[in-house]
Structure formats: C-alpha cells, structure tokens
Image (cartoon, rainbow, N blue to C red):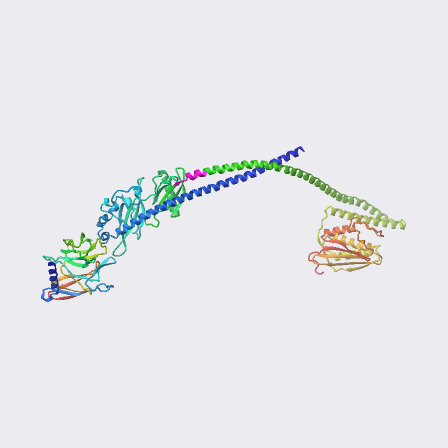
Amino acid sequence: MRLRGLLWFNALFFIMPVTLLAGAVVEGRVELPKSHSAPVQAKRYEIVTKGGVLSTQPPVAVVYLDGVFPSPASLPTKEVTQKDLTFVPALLPIRVGTKVEFPNLDETYHNIFSYSPAKRFDLGRYRPEERPIPVQIFDKPGLITLRCDIHEHMRGLILVLNTSYFVMTDTNGHFRLGGLPAGRYTLKAWIDSRTTREKPVELKNGQTLHVDFP
Amino acid sequence: MRSAVQARDEGVASFRTRLFTAIMVIVVTLTALGFYLAQRKVTADAERNLQDNFQAEISSLHKLEELRHAALAERCNALAAKPRIHAAIEDNAIDLLYPSAKDELRDLMEGDEPPPEQATQSLHARFYRFLDSTGAVIKPPNIYDVGELDPKTEAQLALSRLPDTQQIGYIRGNTEADKGTIDEVIAVPIFSSYTGDVISALVIGFKPLGLEEKNAEVEMRSGVWVNGQLHLPSLPKSARASLNERITSAVANFDREQDNFRVNVDGSPHLLFYKRLNPGSLFPAAYEICVYPLAYSMAQLHRLRWKIGGAGALLLLGGFVASHVVALRFSAPVKKLALDSEENRAQRKRAEAALASTTQELERSARYSADASHQLKSPVTVLRIGLETLLTREGFKPEVYEELSVLLHQTHRLTGVIDDLLLLSRMDAGHLQIASGPVNLSQLVDEWLDDLSALPDSPDVKIEKELTAGLFVAGEKRYTSLIVQNLLENARKYNRPGGLIRVSAHCNARNVVLSVGNTGRTIPPNENIFERFHHRSTPSSVSGHGIGLNLARELARLHGGDLCLVRSENDWTEFEVRFPAADGDNAVA
C-alpha cells in the first residue's frame, strides 16, 4: 500500500502545474534513432542489442540534469518485475542509493544477476511466491545490465544517476522536466549504452527553457 | 682319319656344352624373375594388409573420437551459450569468467581420470582455458580450478585468431621431459549475444584416445606426431629421433594428409603410416603415427625365396640331365652332319683346285698365243725385209719379180694374221683396255672405201654409200677402224664380179648402226662364221685366215656394241655393227 501511495505521489508531482512550484522547467525533444518495428500499443518496450549497443525498442531516452545535488533524506523504492520472461520496465532510471525490488510475476524460476562494473550481484534462483522479494541497493552511478541465468535472452537496464532530476521521453522523444533548481548545469540525454548527448543550460526560477537534442 | 673323329667328338661335346649353357641361362633367368615377382607380390601384399589394418584401426579411432567430439561440442556449445559466460565477456567482467565457468564445467573437471578401458565413454577433461578476442589465452585466477598447465604448454593453446568452428588440436605437455604426454584439445567458439561475432573461445583438453595396441599377430605401435615432435613412448629413444626426422621431412615435403614409408627401427624394417588427425585445424598439424614391424612378411619372403631357389636348383638339375639326353640323341645326326660336311668340304676343295688349274691353263694359253705371236712376228719381218731387198735388185727375170711380189704380199698377210692373233690373245687375257673417245665413223668408212677401190686385185664391184657425214661413235679409233676394215674387206673379198657393196648407217639416241651388205654367195644358215679359225665349208677362190669376224665381233662387244649377220640369202649378205653413239656429237640422225 505504501508503494502505491508513493507512486500516486509521484504522479501528482509531475502533473501539478509548474507555476505552482518554485523552480525551472526544461522541455524539448530528443532526436531518437529510427525504429523499424511497428509502434507498440502499450508502454511496453524491451532491450535490444544491435552491434553491441543496448537500447530500448521502441527507442526512448532518459533526460537528466547533471550536477552535484544534496542527497534527499529518503528515496522511494523502485521495482523491476519479471513478467512474461521480460523485465518490466526494461529501462529504469534511478538516483544513486535507490533500493530496487525484483518481484517475480512469472510462474517459473528466475535468477537475476549482473556482472556490470557499477553493480555486481546475483539474486540466485527464486520462485514467484518467495518472500522476501529480492532487493538490491544501487550505490554507484552507471549502467547496469540485468540478465537472467535461466533465460538467456532476458535483458534489462538500470541507469543509476547522481541526480534526482531525470525523466524518460515518450517514444517521439518529447520530454518535460520540471522543478529544477536555478543555476548553470549540463543537461544530458542518454539514448543508448554507447550514446549520451549533453548541453549546457542556465536555469532561472519560473522560466521554461526549450532544449532540443539533435 | 683319327683327327677327324676327334674333331667330331669335340664338336658334339661343344654342342652339348652350348645346349646346357642355354638351358642354364633360361632356368637362371626364370628363377631370378620368379624371385623378383614373388618379392614384389609379398611386399605389396604385406603393405596392403598393414595399410588395411591401419585404415581400419584409424577409422575406428576416428569414429570414437568423433563421438566424443560431438558430445563435447554439445557440452561446450551449451556452456558457451550460458548467460554468465556471456555476461563475463560482454559486460567487461573477465575476472568472473573462470568462476562462472567453474560451476558449469564442474562435472567435466571433477573426479579422477577414468581407467583406459572407459576412456572412450568418459568426458573427463584435464584442463580448460578461454581465449580472448586476439586468440591469446586468458590467464585463470585460480590455476587449481581449471587444470594445471606449465606456461609452455599453456602457450600452445593460443590460436592466431578466434575460430568460427570447432577446432581440434594436439599439444605436448611437459615439453622438455622425455616422457611427456600428449593432450587433445578442442576449441569451441563463443559468439556474442549482441553482435553474433566470435568474442571468445573455450579450449578444453583431454587425454587423447590411443589406438589399441592389441593385435597379437602384427605388433603395432602407435603415437602422435605434432609440431615437429614425435610422441611414441613405446619406441626406444634412439629410434624415435631418427623416425622423427623422417616424419618431419615427409610431412614438410609432401604436404599429404596421409602416406606410408619404410623405416628401420633398431635395424629391422618397419612400415610407418601417418595420417592427419586434425585436417584444416587452426592448431598445428598433428598426425597419427603407426609403426608396423615387417618381420612377419620378411620371414614369409625368406621362406618363399628358399622355395623358389629350390625349384630353380631342381630345374637346373633337370636341365643338366635333359641337355645330356638331348646331346646324346642329337649327336648321331650331328655326327652324320659332320661327316657330310667333311665330304662336302673335300668336294669343294677339289672343285676349287680344278677351277684354279683351269684358270691357270687359260692364262697360260693366252700368254702362249701372245708369246707365239711375238715369236712369229720377228722371222716374218726378216722374211719381208729380205723379199723387199730382193725386189730392189736388178737383173732377175720378170717372172722372178712377180714371184717375189706374191711372196711379199703373203708376208704382209702373215703379219696381219699375227697382229690379229696378238690382239685376240690380249683380249682373251683381259689385258685390252679401250681408251674411249669420239670417233668419226663416216670419215673412217670413206677412208676404207677409198683404200678398197685402190687395191690392185679389186674386182669390178659397184659401191653404194648411204652415210651422213659426221657420224660419231664412242670408241678407240684403231679398233673401230679395224672393225670397219674387216667388214668392208669381207664384202669385197666374197663378192662376185659385177656385184654391189652397200654401206649405210643410221643412229638413235644411244647407238649408231652401220650396215654393210654385199652380193655374192650366201652363207649357209648352219655355219658359225663367228667362230675362231672358222673356214667356209664350201671351197672358195678367196680365203681368209678365219679370225677376222671373230676379232671384229669381240672388239664391237668390248666397245659396248655388237656385230651380227642380218641376212644372207638371194645373192645378198648383210652384216650390221652397232656402236655406242658419242655423247652429243650426233646432232642429226
């Protein structure tokens, strides 16, 4: 129940009119790689590899404000579920120190592990009903590749960031990031495991800045 | 007679010797041929048997190896597909590679080596290593988990590049030690789950399956040659070194997948087979080596040689006896032959002696007539000179003068006869040489006709001449002249009063033919007027000495022509003489 409440809180946070809050807003569009597959009806996307590069399919980007920010007192717990032999969500951006749960919603075993330098872990085999739900805290920034030792095709990504100011674009590349502190920062757009674009921005309270990543 | 019998016996003995020699040559040739063919056949059979044996052994070995390779390949491919292996390589966690593989390969690595009889079913690995993207060996963090290898041996696992397919290789462990071992290795590619490229390879080492050295009849020894090193522990070290050189040069020079050749191992002949174990592999070429002793086939060959040699000796003995028998059987006809040939020889000698004496006689007679002619000539000359001197004297009665001139005429005739005889005898002796040149026949005839009409006792005859001027014949002038003179004088001499002499000539490309015809008494057909000293059967007022025609014909033949009587009938006698035409002088006929 507490999780649900948190999610609702998050939603309200984003939906609230920006003018009601102090802070700056950045909006714009990230030019995403062309997708050849048919558009997906739901908000489901998966991780694909092409030429050794991991990206989502259909392509989406994570836009975040890079900088040094005081860490918040508490961080919401996130989750990456295993459903129908895929990771949901396939790409999860989180702030450093976030706790992520890995609930198994399939009716089979999974064995989630990561050999990525930013976080190595191995959850071992677990059944759907097993409690407690396996959990990991990600305390180093970087890209983590999630794999399942039993289902070799499963891939998931967790993008661990130093900042709380991040948002995922829609599949057209549009984004809107609000409640940002004023100042000079670098706005970055993570597109795939090899490509991250960046632009310097100067933010002022109450202003909406338009930034496009070509 | 004693010596003849001795010679005959000697002849028979030599015939026997020659017959025996011929038989011996044939027998020896046949025996040698038999030796050669048998040796070839035995050697070829032995080689073929051993080759079959080797092929059977090696194909059964290959089947076992293939089974094992297939099973291993399946395991390796499953392993290579494991997410942890991929994660370790793709997510830059090489340090986790060997730990990740350890669990997966535990069943291959754990436990003791199986006993040899179970080796074919076992998949017990001695070691494993991963190769990085350049083909070099990725160092394991803990050597005890992955199977111990000394650095030199481990270095042999590296490849020049990562393989796309499974590769089989053979490496020598413990390279410096003499009792080193051979390990069979299989390299399996690991493909990237991202790109599909080969990103690594897993190399697993096993104890190789050996050929079973169990064939009791043919004691075979097998081993492996790899990278210039022969691993054949059952051979003594000294033999191994020389064998290794032979194999190395054979493999290097001919580049064949398989072959065989003869070698000497400790002084006894062996047949060595080799066959490539890992054709097309990225690992160094390795060959299965099998050495078979040829002692068995050598013994067989030895036995066969004795048999053939014995048969040859028997044949020789038989030949000796046969030659004796045949010589005895043949000696009777040979003796007869010898006798006959002696008789023949005596007859021939007699005939030769007769021929020689005849020839001598002939020569003697020819010489005699020549001598006689010479001896006759001198007194005739004296006689003639005396008569001529008497004729110049005065004071004799006219009848005496007349008589003297008749006598003088007879001496002239006598001189002519002697000259003719002299010439004939020279011709008979074969001493007469013709100095051939062009002779003007027309002119000769004219001169002689003139002389003829000038003779005092010439009868009243008419002369007809049908002769073109400038007819040339090939010959010597004095002899040609003699022939013409003879014919013309005869035509006058045997003519009748009021008769006719006709001289004509015609010529073709090769010959000139002169015809002399005269009226008068004809010559009977049965008379051989060309015979020497021939005299006419019927009495005549005129007489000749009987050698003129003979001489003329001999001379004509000596010149390459001929003289013959054309006809003699109805008061007409005609002779024809043929001369060879002088080259190019008779422009017109």
Quarter holding residue B216:
top left
In which quadrant will I find the C terminus of chain B?
Answer: bottom right
Viewed as shown, does residue B475 lie left or right of B264? right
Q: Position of residue B18 (x, y in %)?
A: 58, 38
Closer to the camera in the image, A19 or B97: B97
* Residue B544: % across, % down: 82, 50
Q: Is residue B9 above or below residue B486?
A: above
Say if the magenta span includes residue B559: no
Residue B392 in sight in this render: no
For this rendering, which residue is in front, B382 or B567? B567
Residue at (31, 39) in percent of width and height:
B179
Using the rendered view, name the quadrant where residue A68 is placed.
bottom left
Q: Is residue B298 magenta?
A: yes
User: Residue B59: x percent and y percent?
Assistant: 36, 46
Identify which residue, B258 or B308, lies in the foreground: B308
**Closer-to-camera residue (A58/B141):** A58
In the image, the segment drawn in magenta is: B292-301
Of the 4 image quadrants, the one containing the N terminus of chain B is top right
Q: Is residue B304 left or right of residue A143?
A: right
User: Can residue B380 be seen here?
Assistant: yes
